Image: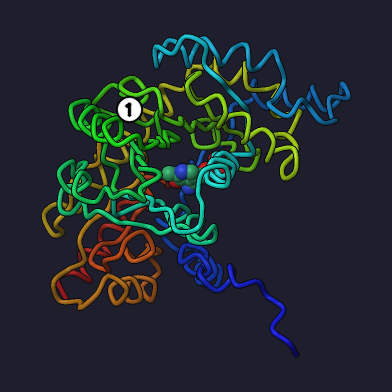
Amino acid sequence: MKNYLAERTKVVDASGIRKVFALGATLKDPVNFSIGQPDFDVPDPIKEVAIQAIREGQNRYSQTAGEDSVLEMLRPRVKAETGWNNPQVMLTSGVTGGLLLAFMALINPGDEVIIPDPYFVMYKHLVRMLGGKCVFVDCYPDFSLPVEKIAAAVTDKTKLIILNSPNNPSGQVYSAQDLKAVAEIAQKRDIILLSDEIYEMYNYERSQVSAATYYDKTVLLKGFGKSYGITGWRMGYTACSETLKPLMEAMLMIQQYTFVCAPMPFQLALPTAMGYDMSTYVQAYRNKRDLLYEGLKGTFNVRKPIGAFYMFPEKPERYATATDFVKDAIAHNVLIIPGNVFSERDTHFRMCFTTTEDKIRQGVEILCQLAKG
Ligand code: PMP
């Protein structure tokens, strides 16, 4: 039979995270550090508003950009955070929706996109599917923003620099100074910054600083899934300044022909979500981070993450690659993800600590034993 698949399917590989998921399904009661989402359910008052919206018949399309009442709540928030006078805001189907629309609106075949490595896996594959070229800049070993390397990576073909802070998979939060320096590089060469801030709520030490405060050609991507335990609701938003209004218009046009709008009844629950105090949930993850870090630090080369809910330790020396270590860990009932899923290197592994304290203790014990051999 003729090969019927489009060429773009050949430039990507099935997600390595999904492969570990599939393996996990075959294990009995594993210690699961693979899932990149909260383990709590959305608080009842937020759930109730969505249920109510469905009962009241709010089940049709919204405007392309989203419900006015929700956008009206978001605009002043974005303005306060960024200093932009008349921020442009649209609701998207998860942050993934915003990423796809922004990339489709910006990337021409051959355009270069600078991506700090390690990176959220979707960037690489979406950029490639659109014919763009990923230019990775290495952030090992401390995962802070490598400003000099970013400056050196810029060429006449650079269209976009991607920033993700708090970071998946490293848990690093970029300093205001480094963000400002990268914003200056972008401004000098007229490059767009894309700032994925989906983990902004999980910031355990620093207050969240956005590159958007330093540069009006920043595309801001924000989400609700990780913050409120509603990853399945597919809720996010994209914001930019008036300077990038044509970009927002292009994204809205592409939304019309792809997603149409973000899921309507869930949009209507967002004002309640945004008013809900999540600090006890954040504190619980801070404690879990500490528990995991204290358990690993004597045996593994690991940095204490400042944000998100991930840790990214180095593989033990006695394993040639992180993948080898992950295979052994999975054989011992612990699910972790090899670093090469998020990186051009295969030296580290990602652990998501959104599980119970008992499971964290159990997992630490098994991984430390394996490391010692
Ligand atoms: N950006 C980052 C950095 C992520 O980790 C994720 C989810 N793992 C996303 C975007 C996608 O989020 P959503 O579920 O809102 O599409």
Residue 304 at what x, y percent from top left? 20, 43
In front of the other: 302 or 216: 216
Above or below residue 60? Residue 84 is: above
Residue under label 1, please give it. 211
In front of the other: 183 or 246: 246
In front of the other: 250 or 373: 250
Q: Of the residues shown, which amino acid type is indicated by label 1?
A: Ala
Above or below residue 200? Residue 26 is: below
Query: Left or right: 335 with respect to 187?
Result: right
Residue 237 at what x, y percent from top left? 57, 29
- Residue at position x 77%, y 27% from top? 51
**Residue furthest to the front:** 156
To which quarter of the image does residue 197 belong? top left
- Residue at position x 29%, y 41% from top? 289
Residue 258 at what x, y percent from top left? 72, 45
Residue 75 at what x, y percent from top left? 55, 14
Res. 71 visible in picture:
yes
